[in-house]
Image (tube, rainbow, N blue to C red):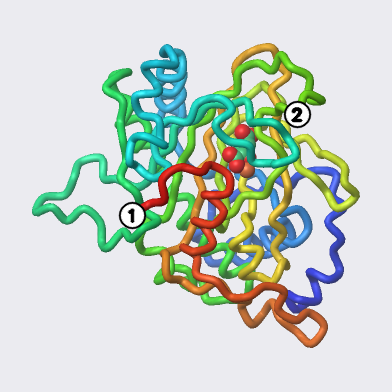
Amino acid sequence: MALVASAAALDGAFDSIPVIDIRDASSSERRAALAHEIRNACTNVGFFYITGHGIPQETIDDLFAAMEAYFSFPLGTKMKLYHKEARSGFNGYAPPLDSNINPTNKGDLHEGFRIGWEELIPKENGEKRANGGPMVEANVWPSEPTGFREAYLNYYQAAVGVGRLLFRLFALALDLPDTYFDDKTKNFATNMRTIHYPPQTRAESDGIVGIGAHSDFLCFTILWQQPGIQALQVLNSEKQWIDATPIPGTLVVNIGDQLARWTNDIFRSTVHRATNNSGVRRYSVPVFFGTDYHVDIKPIPSCVSADRSPKYEPITAGEYYHQRLQMYYGGAPPS
Ligand SMILES: O=C(O)CCC(=O)C(=O)O
Ligand SMILES: [Fe+2]
């Protein structure tokens, strides 16, 4: 069925989130079936779990240990890298209630640490990155705990590998050549946040949740969530909140607003929220994947038809991204 027609047949009233095994994505037979599964997940749910992603457990364990140690430091220590003062764009530390992603709430009860692209061992002759552009801001690093930078960058780079594969699979799912996004994603507009949600003591009716209902604003997100703690929920078209229960060994993938715009809403950018009522600390790690700054986001032809005219004005990826970031987190505009 053509992409536009298959999307029109779906209503988004899902009651569970599909699990997709991406292990054999490089085999040509598997790829077509995989692209089909991904298409169904993106048009109906906007969320799916991936297994077989290949990120070593040790890489995840090292990141977990580093963030757990870092977030246990006193607030004053962490505030030395407060992103609004560190001249690092949005990279660095964000304290609890720094953001309020859903303006109908009073604040998001989490603290975070954000990084962007960086080589673990800087290349010789100063070639840092090919014209990173304004979406690729410098990182700031705490001096403690030991191994923090290495643990963060190892996970970040492993996630970028999974993201590159997903860009190819999304292209296939959209009836495009699998290399469609390659020349649009040269400059690593990929950001990673590690998030600590303290146990929630105030009732949700106070307007304070872990992270308020929102949709992500880049192309897609790959989320590691701590096993054993239910917090993330996803909104279906019937306005029911569906639990995205952590499944050990998986990562959660969700479509963001840029890809929804690009696909004329055929891929769903689904609203989600997280509240930590577990009584213990919860950690999660979203990695957000964007495109290069000057890429035009305008509906791709396979997503437009006589019955489905373009819903959004074209905008560059960079302009859109900064509008949204500024709205949620404020802070100094990147240079
Ligand atoms: O912590 C989570 O499970 C979700 C985080 C999230 O939605 C985000 O950072 O955009
Ligand atoms: Fe999100």
Q: Say which quadrant the N terminus sits in.
A: bottom right
Q: Is residue 183 above or below residue 66?
A: below
Give the image location of residue 199, x and y in percent: 65, 16
Q: Does any portion of residue 18 appear in the rendered image?
A: yes
Side of 41 where 224 appears, left or right: left
User: Between 155 and 108, which is closer to the camera in this rendering?
Assistant: 108
Q: Which residue is mark 2?
A: 207
**In this view of the protein, can residue 251 be seen by the observer?**
no
Does residue 167 lie above or below 59 as drawn? below
Q: Which mark is residue 99?
A: none
Furthest residue toward bottom:
306
Q: Which residue is mark 1?
A: 335
Q: Is residue 64 above or below residue 13?
A: above
Residue under the point 72% across and 51% down:
270
Taking the image as shown, residue 274 lies to the left or right of residue 325, namely right
Q: Secondary structure at mark 1?
A: loop
Image spot of residue 201 (x, y percent) = 71, 14
Q: Quadrant of residue 279?
A: top right
| SS state under label 2 | loop
Looking at the rendering, the quadrant in which ligand 1 lies is top right
Q: Residue at x 65, y 31 (%)?
A: 107
Instruction: State the CA–CA distance, disc 1 to disc 2.
Output: 34 Å
- Quarter of the image for residue 212 reads top right
Figure disc tally: 2
The answer to whether 30 is drawn above or below residue 205 in the figure is below
- Nearer the observer, 302 or 24: 302
Where residue 304 sits: x, y (%)? 71, 81
Residue nearer the viewer, 107 or 135: 107
